[in-house]
């Protein structure tokens, strides 16, 4: 066992982790521990843009962005945190640009922006161009730029070290335990402050846009150390994943004028969201697609629809909508413009479907995409332990792993990249600040015991069960019953199934006895995380008897603000999920019926 | 359909030297090669070691030699390579286990070319303005995902690992031709070295290997030209 000491340890090398690292390392000794090389992080898969009311092409302001986000969250987002994020947005986007981020540009040289779902001009209710983009690889450019700046600033990295436990002493952070992939050795990192920036857990579901690495390690580690998980029932299904594969097709396609079409050739979103149509919020569009498919209007009766961005069709509907360019000219696009703005999407379609989106529609279905829930934090990214918002000293979380909550029951597109930048920065600053007035807590004597015990259990199972079978059954039951639409019976079935799978998981055995790059051991450990998160998600969902944002129930179709305008907190204690609730922070936005 | 795979295996804890192992898996023509590896790992041999994450060609984890060509396993389909597939680690970097190579020498080269933005001392309140044309000038090289497929396909790199390699030059290019950047001269100086751009003999393996379809050889040529002419046009 090797031991290291830093004032700040950051777990995860994606956008939130790297932004935190840039800020923490200004004044505190800092290291980033990542199970992947940082540039492999899932931030790099984000496509369409980062939301900020720059107003480069048309009138816009942070207050509209705030209201859109509150509305998008179906009023479950904490309004103080949302205000803070949207107000900071222009400044952090400029900061990224100053770091060299190659945004696409307007003819006048300013950062280019495009429309995205749920972002509106609050006066007219029409879509507004707020998503600052770099073609359709905005996340890639953010991740690369932040990593480049970390190299410039000589940030310490432990690449391919897999954090498996959080250490605490005297009720405060003491460090983390990590397994070095190359050697199989355990390392203890002694720290004053620990920032979790480990991303999401979309691998719980069968069809997902998420990377293999998205296994919810941060939330699972926290749950095992007595930290609750907040709002886990709210998981976003992105409307446009490639049929059967789940690979993301950016909402930017619809921002550029693409439309969703059913088997009758109808642009069905007109019926569900008469005002903004295909640019409604993601939960709204995914539900509409589900209903179309349920009504037998999936393409050829199957479980997919068409996303069509062929220029003639785009121009036809743009003309019907009266859409104009920012300078007032009618919106008319061309194959060349689409190729230039959506090169990666076109490449994905060529590679995986043999489809050319400039001449053919893309087969799409809703795909598990984003965790609104996660480790509860306050606006300062400090992790909180209970409904009274009691802070756990020295533990921070930012990005998808965290629940601040700025996304509430449904995240608006472009707000995830904004979240990681704003709250990654906040976490870096706050953690560094914390270390100035804190001593290192003593490391517990049994620092690695809990990690070793978990690995021992995985190595000593009977081998009767295959991890892959358990993973498959979990993904299917979660996709079928804790997906876009939910009912009591299905969710109960999911809860029962996950509990059965957790029992069966005890009979899984890691076959690989080697130390070097034992990816089987870590993959199976990751599955244990997914199972915990699936259970917490299904139990939290079953308890919430209303429909709000991404949590849509056939048996309780309406939002119930009287009973359910509150955040769920879920604890995992002695193998049981215990639920609690805490109020939503309201400032000035009273809940209204949500219409797009 | 059935696909026959021949996979390079090497476990330094057990094996004196590498060997090849054969597997047969059931597959669809539209399956990714990565899907086949997953199927083997899940049901036949959990010890098979390789890297993967995004599974759709944007994270750069799973560069490997597939039927002799560097590809991302998640971006090549069975129908593209046929039913007999040989999979090996990329060349020129030390194998750590099976298909996993040591990427540190690769990243060291990358870090040696000032692969980050060096801006003006004074920044405007808002964004630095850049025309769409100036932005377009270096668009191609911003696509790099640092997978290593290009550098590990380069005979000059195989011959001498001190050569910075195509990926590092691509990342230098991304900044050299960015109208906002101030450190082009320093980067050109670094690359005007015996282990810099002149090791490139325009073999084009890198361009063929790039899963992002970056015109790597052209980018290297542009850097060579900039060094020769001291001009950035």
Image: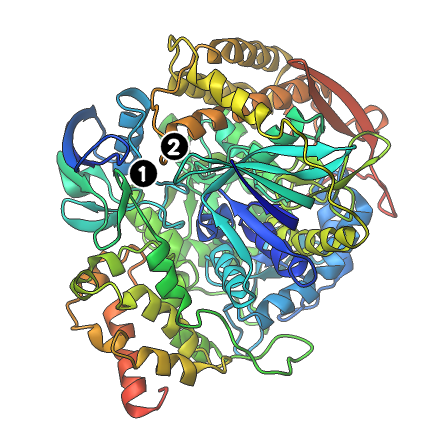
**Residue at the (44%, 49%) spot, across then down:** A37
* Residues under numbered marks 2 and 1 in contact, where contact means CB atoms less than 8 Å apart: yes
- x, y percent for residue A281: 62, 43
The answer to which of A407 and B92 lies nearer the viewer is: B92
The answer to which of A556 and A376 lies nearer the viewer is: A376
Chain letter of the residue beneath label 1 in the structure image: B
Number of the label disc, if any, that sits on residue B50: 1
Which element carries disc 1, helix, strand or loop? loop
Establish if A102 lies above or below A298: below
The answer to whether residue A418 of the structure is visible from this angle is yes
Local crowd size for mark 2, using a 10 Å CA cut-off: few (<14), some (14–19), many (≥20): many
- x, y percent for residue A163: 54, 37
Establish if B141 lies above or below A40: below
Establish if A551 lies above or below B59: above
**Residue at the (34%, 67%) spot, across then down:** B168
Quadrant for the C terminus of chain A in the image: top right
Residue position for label 2: A519
Chain letter of the residue beneath label 2 in the structure image: A
The answer to which of A541 and A501 lies nearer the viewer is: A501
Which element carries disc 2, helix, strand or loop? helix
Is residue A24 toward the left or the right of residue B161 in the image? right
Based on the displayed image, in which of its 4 quarters is residue B150 positioned?
bottom left
Establish if A397 lies above or below A569: below
The answer to whether residue A122 of the structure is visible from this angle is no
- x, y percent for residue B131: 49, 80
Do marks 2 and 1 share a subunit? no
Based on the displayed image, in which of its 4 quarters is residue A595 positioned?
top right
């Amino acid at each position: 066992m090797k031991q290291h000491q830093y004032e700040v340890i950051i777990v995860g090398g994606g956008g939130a982790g790297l932004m935190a690292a840039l800020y923490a390392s200004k004044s505190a000794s800092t290291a980033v521990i990542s199970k992947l090389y940082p540039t492999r992080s899932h931030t790099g898969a984000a496509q369409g843009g980062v939301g900020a009311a720059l107003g480069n092409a048309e009138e816009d302001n942070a207050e509209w962005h705030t209201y859109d986000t509150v509305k998008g969250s179906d009023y479950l987002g904490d309004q103080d945190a949302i205000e803070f994020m949207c107000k900071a947005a222009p400044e952090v986007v400029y900061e990224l640009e100053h770091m060299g981020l190659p945004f696409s540009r307007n003819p006048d040289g300013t950062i280019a922006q495009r429309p995205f779902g749920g972002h509106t001009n609050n006066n007219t209710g029409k879509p507004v161009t707020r998503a600052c983009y770099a073609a359709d690889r905005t996340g890639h450019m953010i991740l690369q730029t932040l990593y480049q700046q970390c190299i410039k600033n000589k940030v310490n990295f432990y690449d391919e070290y897999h954090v498996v436990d959080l250490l605490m002493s005297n009720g405060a952070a003491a460090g983390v335990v990590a397994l070095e992939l190359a050697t199989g050795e355990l390392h203890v990192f002694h720290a004053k402050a620990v920032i979790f920036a480990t991303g999401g857990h979309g691998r719980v579901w069968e069809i997902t846009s998420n990377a293999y690495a998205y296994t919810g390690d941060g939330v699972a580690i926290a749950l095992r150390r007595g930290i609750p998980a907040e709002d886990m029932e709210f998981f976003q299904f992105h409307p446009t994943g490639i049929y059967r594969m789940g690979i993301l097709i950016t909402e930017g396609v619809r921002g550029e004028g693409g439309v969703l079409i059913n088997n009758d050739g109808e642009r069905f979103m007109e019926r569900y969201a008469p005002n903004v149509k295909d640019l409604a919020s993601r939960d709204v569009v995914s539900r509409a697609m589900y209903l179309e498919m349920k009504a037998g209007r999936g393409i050829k009766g199957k479980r997919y629809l068409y996303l069509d961005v062929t220029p003639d069709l785009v121009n036809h509907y743009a003309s019907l909508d009266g859409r104009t360019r920012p300078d007032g000219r009618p919106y008319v696009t061309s194959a060349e413009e689409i190729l230039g703005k959506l090169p990666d999407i076109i490449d994905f379609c060529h590679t995986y479907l043999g489809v050319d989106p400039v001449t053919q529609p893309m087969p799409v279905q809703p795909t598990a995409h984003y965790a609104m829930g996660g480790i509860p934090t306050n606006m300062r990214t400090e992790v909180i332990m209970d409904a009274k918002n009691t802070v756990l000293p020295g533990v921070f979380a930012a990005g998808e792993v965290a629940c601040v909550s700025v996304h509430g029951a449904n995240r608006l597109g472009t707000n995830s990249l904004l979240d990681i930048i704003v709250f990654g920065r906040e976490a870096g600053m706050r953690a560094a600040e914390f270390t100035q007035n804190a001593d290192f807590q003593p490391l517990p004597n049994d620092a690695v015991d809990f990690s070793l015990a978990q690995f021992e259990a995985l190595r000593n199972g009977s081998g009767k069960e295959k991890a892959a079978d358990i993973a498959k059954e979990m993904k299917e039951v979660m996709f079928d019953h804790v997906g876009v639409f939910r009912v009591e019976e299905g969710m109960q079935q999911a809860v029962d199934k996950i509990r059965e799978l957790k029992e069966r998981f005890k009979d899984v055995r890691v076959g690989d006895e080697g130390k070097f790059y034992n990816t089987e051991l870590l993959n199976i450990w990751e599955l244990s995380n997914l199972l915990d998160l699936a259970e917490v998600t299904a139990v939290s969902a079953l308890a919430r008897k209303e429909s709000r944002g991404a949590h849509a129930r056939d048996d309780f179709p309406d939002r119930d603000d009287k009973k359910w305008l509150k955040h769920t907190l879920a604890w995992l204690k002695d193998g049981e999920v215990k639920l609690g609730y805490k109020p939503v922070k309201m400032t000035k936005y009273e809940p209204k019926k949500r219409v797009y | 359909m059935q696909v026959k795979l021949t996979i390079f295996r090497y476990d330094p804890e057990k094996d004196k030297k590498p060997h090849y192992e054969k597997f047969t898996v059931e597959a669809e023509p539209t399956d990714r090669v990565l899907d086949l590896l997953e199927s083997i790992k899940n049901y036949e041999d959990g010890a098979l070691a390789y890297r993967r994450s995004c599974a759709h060609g944007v994270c750069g984890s799973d560069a490997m030699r597939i039927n002799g060509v560097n590809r991302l396993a998640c971006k090549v389909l069975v129908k593209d390579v046929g039913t007999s597939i040989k999979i090996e680690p990329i060349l020129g970097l030390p194998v750590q286990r099976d298909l996993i190579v040591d990427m540190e020498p690769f990243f060291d080269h990358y870090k040696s070319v000032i692969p980050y933005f060096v801006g003006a001392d004074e920044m405007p309140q808002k964004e630095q303005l850049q025309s769409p044309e100036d932005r377009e000038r270096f668009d191609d090289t911003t696509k790099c995902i640092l997978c290593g497929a290009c550098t590990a396909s380069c005979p000059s790199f195989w011959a001498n690992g001190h050569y910075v390699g195509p990926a590092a030059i691509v990342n230098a290019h991304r900044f050299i031709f960015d109208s906002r950047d101030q450190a082009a001269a320093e980067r050109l100086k670094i690359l005007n070295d015996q282990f810099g751009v002149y090791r490139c003999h325009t073999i084009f393996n890198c361009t063929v290997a790039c899963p992002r379809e970056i015109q790597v050889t052209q980018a290297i040529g542009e850097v060579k030209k900039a060094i020769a002419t001291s001009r950035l046009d």
